[in-house]
Amino acid sequence: PRLAPAGVGAGVGRPGLLMRARLYRALFAVIGWGALGLQYALLLQNNPGVGAGILTLNFFSFFTILTNLLAALALTGPALAPDGALGRWSRSEGVRAAVAMYIVVVGVVYHLLLAQTWNPQGWQKVADTLLHTVMPLAFVGVEFALDDDAHRIDILATCRTSYKTGVEMEAMMACSVAALTIYDMCKAADKGIVIEQVRLKYKAGGKSGEWR
């Protein structure tokens, strides 16, 4: 199997972009924390004979929970205190790329491999949808194309910014982290997965203009 990441970077300036981005993050931060709280409450409710400590430890042992926790934190920082420690942490290139890739891969792997194995009902379905669908969609900008015949996954990330610096590195880092996450989740089946051809496909804006 082979993973082929490619990045697209663009620099754009729009009035009010920062305010809209802050409101967007605040909305999905609330959704993220609500989803985590709902899932934890359902875990306690459905296991009355098990101690809260054991259930809490079990709750935080799931990759989906940890990833959604990181996503909620990354959205909360810029929304509430953009200049604080959490806000600065959330704005760093590595954190943004890693959280986006982890949460998107959670959604992709769930819907491709796990969704058909169970049928949640009621509030469990609400929590399941929020954690595996809504939160990953909050970080859209990463596309996955499966080629079954070639045993290959193509990964494309698109990044935009209103700042003067370009985002080519962020786009390629997003693809690279996505590829590494897929490798980490699939290495039990095949440790010979190859990550190759990490490259920039298109860039627009900034001092250097358009590049293909």
Image (cartoon, rainbow, N blue to C red):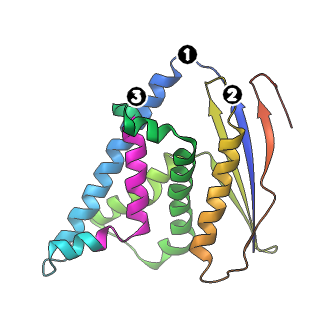
The residue located at (81%, 58%) in the rendering is 197
Quadrant into which the C terminus falls: top right
Against 185, is 209 above or below?
Answer: above
Q: Give the residue type that dot 3 points to.
A: Asp
Q: Which of marks 1 and 3 is in front?
A: 3
| Residue 3 screen position, x and y as percent | 74, 65
Mark in front: 1 vs 2: 2
Position of 42 relative to 30 (above/below)? below
- Please report the residue visible at 23 percent of the width from the left and 73 percent of the height from the top: 55
Q: Look at label 1 and name its amino acid.
A: Pro
**Looking at the image, which residue is at 73% across and 79% down?**
192
Q: Are marks 1 and 2 in contact (CB under 8 Å)?
A: no
- Judge whether residue 169 is colored magenta: no
Q: First in sequence: mark 1 or mark 3?
A: 1
Kindly identify which residue carries mark 2. 11
In this rendering, would 49 be left or right of 212? Answer: left
Callout 3: helix, strand or loop?
loop
Residue 178 x/y as whole percent: 62, 58
Q: Look at mark 1 in the image and give the residue it sits on.
A: 15
**Is residue 73 found inside the magenta-colored segment of the image?**
yes
The percent position of residue 183, horizontal first and vertical second, equals: 64, 70
Give the Cα distance between marks 2 and 3: 22 Å
**Which of labels 2 and 3 is toward the front?**
3
Q: Which of marks 2 and 3 is nearer the N terminus?
A: 2
* Outermost residue, right side: 212
Which span of residues is magenta-colored?
A: 58-77
Which quadrant would the N terminus be assigned to in this image? bottom right
As measured in the structure, the alpha-carbon distance from the residue carrying label 1 to the one carrying label 3 is 20 Å
Residue designated by label 3: 83
In the image, 100: left or right of 84?
right
